[in-house]
Image (cartoon, rainbow, N blue to C red):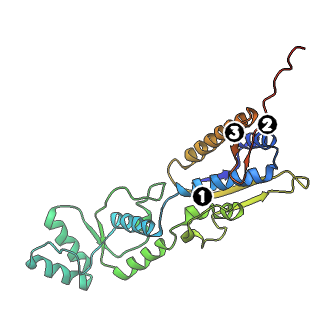
Amino acid sequence: MIDVTLDNKNLAAALTQLAKAANVGLGPIIKEEARYLTQLFIKFTPPKTRAQGRKAIEVDLQKAVGLLDQNSFARAREEVRLPMRELIRRRDNVTLQAAMREMDGNQWIVKDFTPQDHVSKRNRYGRVRRKSYVMTTDKMVYRRYLRDVQSRVGWAASGWIPAAKATGARYKKFSDRFGSASGYVNYWFGPANAKPPYLTATHKNVKIPNYQDKINAAFASRTDTTLRKVKRLLAGKAVNLGFTRVQGAAPVTAPSNP
């Protein structure tokens, strides 16, 4: 797990140059840039929707431990399907396990469900990549556990919500129920005569693969974009700052000889 911080010295220096070139306050520029970056980070933080996240968790759980219920063995012949469903109804795990192993030769395990059956199969990113041969007839406990894990959908995106609310960025509404448990923000946008404007946002315990690389790439891209805006302003060209459009200073020309 990693902690990600929305605070970058290179970008901060570029924004300071931009504020001077545009002759506007640094606070509004920092707020606008933080708003854009926050929206970008939220956009590439899965899931896109709550339904998508809930489905991903269900699929992962099914890979870790399958559920045997009265819908199981639907494609089997009746003389196989009915006895197997009766064993499931009785939760006769021992007989079920022996019968399933005899059917296809795989080393099936049929047992009472525990959360460890799922957690132990997760990789360091919290995902289950390989299907196991563990099954359970413990439907009620299984379903209760699934609902509990699904209730945490949106945790990753929620880490940016404090920054989103501070800057006016759009965010995923289904994530706005974890409070500040997964992230926090400190900021000051002005007036500048009180103290220098700044924003620092921290997102805690991220498990998403290559997440830090995406954050770093976003900072590098926005730093380049900001420096290009500075060059445009110094060249006398107009620049859109997001909250306002400013015209660049007239280029300085050398005086002509009398």
Check disc 2 and report the residue beneath it: 249
Give the residue drawn at x 64%, y 61%.
169
- Of badges 1 and 3, nearer the viewer stands 3
Asked if residue 52 lies left or right of residue 183, the reply is left
- Of badges 2 and 3, nearer the viewer stands 2
Q: Nearer the viewer, residue 226 or 180?
A: 226
Whether pointer 1 and pointer 3 mark residues with C-beta atoms closer than 8 Å, the reply is no
Check disc 1 and report the residue beneath it: 205
Amino acid type, residue under disc 2 in the picture: Ala
**Image quarter of the N terminus:** bottom right
Name the image quarter holding residue 10: top right
Judge the density around disc 1: few (<14), some (14-19), many (≥20) Cα neighbours within 10 Å: some
The image position of residue 222, as x and y in percent, is 64, 43
Secondary structure beneath dot 2 equals loop
Amino acid type, residue under disc 3 in the picture: Lys
Give the Cα separation between the discs numbered 1 and 3.
35 Å
Name the image quarter holding residue 238: top right
Secondary structure beneath dot 3 equals helix
202 in relation to 141, above or below: above
Earlier along the polypeptide chain: callout 1 or callout 3? Answer: 1
**Image quarter of the C terminus:** top right
241 in relation to 178, above or below: above
What's the mark number on residue 229? 3
Asked if residue 162 lies left or right of residue 188, the reply is left
